[in-house]
């Protein structure tokens, strides 16, 4: 399975590292909107989780070191209903077993729509 297949159903396109942050984009479609006609909160959560997790996983190695999100907090601060969203994630702090990450989702014009923080657990490989 290719890298994009993990989030392709949602329409997320990995961009890669830009200025030290991992970036993903999503061109909004009707399926991303809630009953009120704005982006569903779960879409923001998926974008944040993808960008924040990959900011660590893709920074560690080309193959990516296994890690899982232990917890994530999201603040929804804006709404969108069209255009392309851009999510950015970055590492804030790291220990041997955990990684603190943060991210944000912005509209095409740079307006902040959501902010998130998360804690990831590094999975030690055996064998």
Image: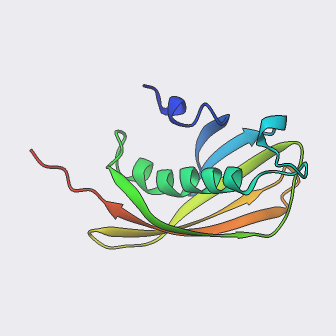
Position of the N terminus by quadrant = top left
Residue extending farthest to the front is 35
Q: Is residue 103 above or below residue 66?
A: below
Q: Is residue 5 above or below residue 93?
A: above
Q: Residue at 67% of width from left, 53% of height from top?
A: 42
Residue closer to the observer: 21 or 64? 64
Question: Is residue 88 visible in the rendered structure shown here?
Answer: yes
Q: Please give the count of numbered marks on the rendered protein.
A: 0
Side of 36 relative to 21 (left or right) = right
Q: Position of residue 8 (x, y in %)?
A: 60, 31
Q: Residue at 72% of width from left, 40% of height from top?
A: 26
Question: Is residue 19 visible in the rendered structure shown here?
Answer: no
Q: Quadrant of residue 94?
A: bottom left
Q: Residue at 61% of width from left, 56% of height from top?
A: 48
Side of 70 relative to 78 (left or right) = left
Q: Is residue 8 above or below residue 68?
A: above
Position of the C terminus by quadrant = top left
Q: Position of residue 85 (x, y in %)?
A: 77, 48
Residue closer to the observer: 72 or 90? 72
Q: Position of residue 89 (x, y in %)?
A: 58, 59
Q: Is residue 37 above or below residue 31?
A: below
Q: Position of residue 107 (x, y in %)?
A: 83, 53
Q: Residue at 84% of width from left, 65% of height from top?
A: 78
Residue closer to the observer: 73 or 126? 73
């Amino acid at each position: 399975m290719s890298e994009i297949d993990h989030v392709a159903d949602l329409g997320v396109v990995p961009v890669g590292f830009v200025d030290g942050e991992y970036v993903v984009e999503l061109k909004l479609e009707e399926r991303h909107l809630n009953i009120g006609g704005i982006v569903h909160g779960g879409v923001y959560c998926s974008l944040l989780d993808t960008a924040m997790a990959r900011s660590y996983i893709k920074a560690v190695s080309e193959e990516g070191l296994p890690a899982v999100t232990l917890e994530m907090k999201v603040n929804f601060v804006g709404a969108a209903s069209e255009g392309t969203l851009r999510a950015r994630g970055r590492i804030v702090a790291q220990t041997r077993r955990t990684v603190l990450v943060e991210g944000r989702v912005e509209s095409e014009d740079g307006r902040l729509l959501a902010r998130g923080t998360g804690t990831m657990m590094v999975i030690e490989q055996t064998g």
